[in-house]
Amino acid sequence: MERTFIILKPDAVQRQLVGELVARFERHGLKIVAMKFMQVSIDLAREHYAVHQARPFFNDLIAYITSGPVAAMVLEGPAAIQIVRNMVGATNPAEAAPGSIRGDYGMQIGRNLVHASDGPETAQTEVALWFNDSELVSYERDLERWILE
Ligand code: IDP
Ligand code: MG
């Protein structure tokens, strides 16, 4: 079983798309393991996006992710990382396939609505950066056998 980390970025919150986007993940069959609504600090933003610190858009990226509250969550399922990346779509909404979140709701790369972990190592690092162990909830879904064989 795999876990992946997702942020519904400030534009998703301001555009009142939180429910719609969470519904997409739920409908797909992904299991919500953790979720919180929060204002991201500059320090957390810099740590989360540390891999991009040398990029020309880094300061804009930090300004964007700290510009208002976000909804952060951990989703679980077999191949959850790849499934969520597919659902999110290409980084630039202009290149994202219709049917993906960025392809359906986004216009520009600097307002692309959602972050999702890009691999097993980043997923593990990001989950640990954003959530304490006690915030990751273990429970059974009654309909599990109708989603996973
Ligand atoms: P990803 O979110 O699809 O994984 P990354 O390459 O990891 O894309 O970039 C992280 C975030 O940085 C993007 O989601 C986007 O918000 C922003 N970003 C990436 N490239 C650019 C750019 O060229 N200009 C402005 N913002 C960018
Ligand atoms: Mg990325």
Image (cartoon, helix red, strand yellow):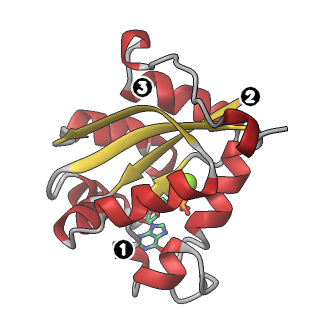
Cα distance, mark 3 to mark 1? 23 Å
Establish if 111 lies above or below 73: below
Q: Which residue is mark 3?
A: 129
Characterize the local packing of mark 3: few (<14), some (14-19) or many (20 or more) Cα atoms within 10 angstroms. few
Question: Residue 19, position in %: x, y?
Answer: 31, 60
Residue that appears at 24% across and 34% down: 43
Q: Which is nearer the N-term, disc 3 or disc 1? A: 1
Q: Secondary structure at mark 1?
A: helix
Name of the residue lying farthest toward the top = 134
Question: Residue 137, position in %: x, y?
Answer: 45, 19
Q: Secondary structure at mark 3?
A: helix
Task: Please give the label number shown on residue 146.
Answer: none
Residue that appears at 64% across and 58% down: 85
Q: Which residue is mark 1?
A: 110
Q: Amino acid at mark 2?
A: Met
Q: Nearer the viewer, residue 96 or 42?
A: 96
- Quadrant assignment for the C terminus: top right
Q: In the image, is the residue at mark 1 within 8 Å of ligand 1 by its beta carbon? A: yes
